[in-house]
């Protein structure tokens, strides 16, 4: 029996990814980790292809990671900056995308502050029959698929299996702590971790973590201790104060007192617990600096490194897709 072949042209959400699709991404990422370890960490896989980076929202890690991933695959990149674009002259987002399509773009990486924008551009690409693949690099409070995929690869790599596999997370308890309400990272992580068979617990203040999240098959806690109890991994999320239009917290000091990750609190977890954070981190708020900087505890550096390999894998797989998909 032959293995299923990757067929998705777009990566917009992780909600409907099948376990075998995650396995393909993990295996492909592992091969690019090996490429990045070489003295010359570059392959001609996407030579002659054009990857357009449309970041309508500020980004450091994701944007640089995608740009480096494209260059490691020998692709040419087009960088879009809204502040110096024709959007200031009244051009629509779809017309901007069409302009880049006319420059023979093959793949588009899109981040936008409003949910659904990458989906709209992907639909337009399909309507026009362009064959161009679209990657959601974070849209509003909806999803951030590649961040969750790099988190998944980082977690699966902890059991030293070669290549990393979803099976390594089956039955693991993983706590996600912080601003769940505004987090596109949390939603994508929930989809991927549930697909792996992990036990996911969310923790944070009631204003930022509602019981509605339980519909996704996770457990919700307004007290940190039960979420951390016997956890194998803990993901801290940034407080996204720029998205908070209402008064969700008394103060950052109060938040840290109740939900900040410290060595003392992590003693509730499994021995050998590992900490993740998608960045940028508010030190002394979501977690203490000594926790974040401890190589025995923190996987933050590995997350950043793995991000390039994961995005290389996604660019590679979408560039080879034969069928238009979601």
Image: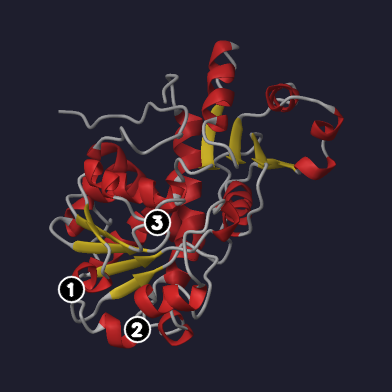
> Where's residue 96, x and y in %?
74, 27
Mark 3 lies on residue? 208
Depth check, front residue: 85 or 255: 255
Residue 263 falls left or right of residue 220:
right
| Distance (Cα) linking label 3 and label 1 | 21 Å
Q: Position of residue 182 (x, y in %)?
A: 46, 51
User: What residue lies at 28% left-to-right and 46% top-to-bottom?
Assistant: 213
Query: Which secondary structure lies at badge 1?
Result: loop
Q: Are marks 3 and 1 in contact (CB under 8 Å)?
A: no
Q: Dot 1 surroundings within 10 Å: few (below 14), some, or many (20 or more)? A: some
Distance (Cα) linking label 2 and label 1: 19 Å
- Secondary structure under badge 2? loop
Label 2: few (<14), some (14–19) or many (≥20) C-alpha neighbours in 10 Å? few
Dot 2 or dot 1: first in sequence order is 1
Does the image show residue 37? no
Q: Which residue is mark 2?
A: 296
Q: Gap between marks 2 and 3, in whole Å?
A: 29 Å
Q: Is 3 located above or below residue 179 in the figure?
A: above
The label shown at residue 114 is none
Residue 110 appears anywhere in the view:
yes
In the image shown, does 211 or 31 lie closer to the viewer?
A: 211
Quadrant in which residue 3 is drawn: top left
N-terminal of the pair, mark 2 or mark 3, is 3
Q: Disc number at residue 229?
A: 1
């Amino acid at each position: 029996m032959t293995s299923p072949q990757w067929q998705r042209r777009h990566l917009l959400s992780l909600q409907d990814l099948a376990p075998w699709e995650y396995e393909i991404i993990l295996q492909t990422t592992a091969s690019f980790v090996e490429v990045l370890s070489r003295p010359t960490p570059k392959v001609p896989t996407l030579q002659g292809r054009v990857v357009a980076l449309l970041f309508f929202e500020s980004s450091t890690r994701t944007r640089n990671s995608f740009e480096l991933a494209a260059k490691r695959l020998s692709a040419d990149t087009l960088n879009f900056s809204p502040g110096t674009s024709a959007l200031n002259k009244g051009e629509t987002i779809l017309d901007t995308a069409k302009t880049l399509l006319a420059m023979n773009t093959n793949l588009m990486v899109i981040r936008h502050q409003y949910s659904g924008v990458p989906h709209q551009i992907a639909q337009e690409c399909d309507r026009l029959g362009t064959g161009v693949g679209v990657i959601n690099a974070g849209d509003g409070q909806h999803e951030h698929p590649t961040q969750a995929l790099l988190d998944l690869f980082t977690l699966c790599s902890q059991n030293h299996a070669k290549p990393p596999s979803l099976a390594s997370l089956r039955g693991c308890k993983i706590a996600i702590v912080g601003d769940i309400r505004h987090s596109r990272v949390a939603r994508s992580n929930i989809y991927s971790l549930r697909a792996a068979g992990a036990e996911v617990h969310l923790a944070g203040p009631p204003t930022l973590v509602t019981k509605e999240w339980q519909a996704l098959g996770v457990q919700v806690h307004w007290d940190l201790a039960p979420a951390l109890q016997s956890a194998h991994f803990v993901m801290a999320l940034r407080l996204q104060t720029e998205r908070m239009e209402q008064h969700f917290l008394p103060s950052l000091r109060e938040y840290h007192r109740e939900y900040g990750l410290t060595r003392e609190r992590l003693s509730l977890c499994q021995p050998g617990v590992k900490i993740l954070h998608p960045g940028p981190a508010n030190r002394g708020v979501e977690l203490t600096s000594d926790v974040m900087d401890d190589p025995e505890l923190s996987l933050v550096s590995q997350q950043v490194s793995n991000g390039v390999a994961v995005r290389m894998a996604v660019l590679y797989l979408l560039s080879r897709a034969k069928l238009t998909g979601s």
